[in-house]
Amino acid sequence: MAVLGVALATMPADAQPSNTIGRVKIATGSAFVVRAGTSMPASPGLALLETDSLKTGADGRLGVSLNDDTRISIGPDSEARLSRYRYAPSEGAIALVLNFIRGAAVYASGQIAKLSPDAVRLETPAAIVGVRGTTVAVRVDPE
Amino acid sequence: MRLGAGFAVLGLTCALASGCAQVRRVAVDDPQRPPHDLAVLLPDSDGTVGHATVSNASGTTDLSEARAATRISRNQAPSAATVLTEADVQREFGDALSALPPAPQTFTLHFQFESENLTPESRALVTATLQAVKARPVPDVLVVGHTDTTGSATLNFQLALRRAQTVRALLVAAGLDESAVAVASHGEAQPLVPTPDNTYEARNRRVLITVR
């Protein structure tokens, strides 16, 4: 029950725009959030939206937290996309799809994986990773 | 430095025998190896190890122990699971792991019956919460109020909201940026300990704080 409590608490309108899905927590070196084709520096605190991509250069690292406590980080020369994010447990809407495009990434599960493990899909160019509440590291070679 | 393609072959051999965890690793650093993806199961921050399934059109590999790994080449089934060393994990993922935000911390504060006053034990937790907040790079805090089932659901919603606001005010008074704290009420709808209606239950009169 405590789990759902946290889940529902992420909705208050006074805290953040309702379409914010998370925030940048850690960024070093060249680290960017790419939104609708535009790159912006990933400064800590930056709000994230569904379909944003996380992207780093050769000296970059980037770590984010999402509303359901999911955490994602990427190493240098890496890219991952927050392709789909739904976190409204009271409406039965729960989904998380991450696309690991290149480089190294770490996914640490949050409430979405606890409430509905099948709602989480981590995709690489060659496979899909399903999780049962856990931490997974993925590396994607350049083609 | 990359783990070599020779790894996958070893993994497949191993799948035919028991005790796969003890696979002998041969260091191969072959720049000519075909590109592949690597997926590794890591322990959670609390030390527990979950489970991951890596699949594509050609097959599926289960990862169920710490540092179990599979390699996936395009158009081939994921390799059988092998177990990486801690050094392998650090080499491949050290930078990414160092950027992973710390796991959220939760604190549960309890209230005296039908009041907005914290129990003495819980008052002490306010300090612990603040310390957790200050230790984080860009903290955001969720405060969710709950009641027991004594009284009407409507009044309990309001009571739980007041409790959450009380806790928020304590945190803000102690120096937390107001914009970093979100407040919500779940009234009597989500008891920690399920009870019939109109049941006095101290454990359900609580505010849950999540710091992340």
Image (cartoon, rainbow, N blue to C red):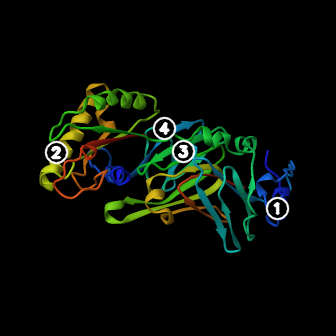
Which of label 4 and label 1 is nearer to you? 1
Give the Cα distance between marks 1 and 3: 41 Å
Q: Amino acid at mark 1?
A: Cys
For the residue labelled by badge 2, is the local secondary structure a helix, a strand or a loop? helix
Q: Residue under circle 3? A: A32
Please say whether residue B85 is visible from this viewpoint: yes
Q: Mark 4 highlights which residue?
A: A43
Q: Residues within 10 Å of mark 4 (few under 14, many from 20)?
A: some
Chain under disc 3? A
Left or right, B69 with respect to B167, comes to right
- When asked about the image quadrant of residue B207, the answer is top left
CA distance separating discs 3 and 4: 8 Å
Q: Is residue B153 above or below residue A47?
A: below
Circle 3 residues within 10 Å: few <14, some 14–19, many ≥20: many
Can you identify the residue that label 1 sits on? B14
Nearer to us of marks 4 and 2 is 2
* Residue at numbered disc 2: B159
A42 vs A122, nearest the viewer: A122
Callout 4, which amino acid?
Answer: Ser
Q: Say yes or no: labels 1 and 2 on the same chain.
A: yes
User: Same chain, marks 4 and 1?
Assistant: no
Mark 4–mark 2 Cα distance, whole angstroms, equals 38 Å
At 45% from the left and 63% from the top, the residue drawn is A116
Q: Which of the marked residues, 3 or 4, is nearer the chain's N terminus?
A: 3
Q: Quadrant of the N terminus of chain B?
A: top right
* Labels 1 and 2 touching (C-beta < 8 A): no
Label 4, secondary structure: give it. loop
Which amino acid, by three-letter code, is at mark 2? Leu
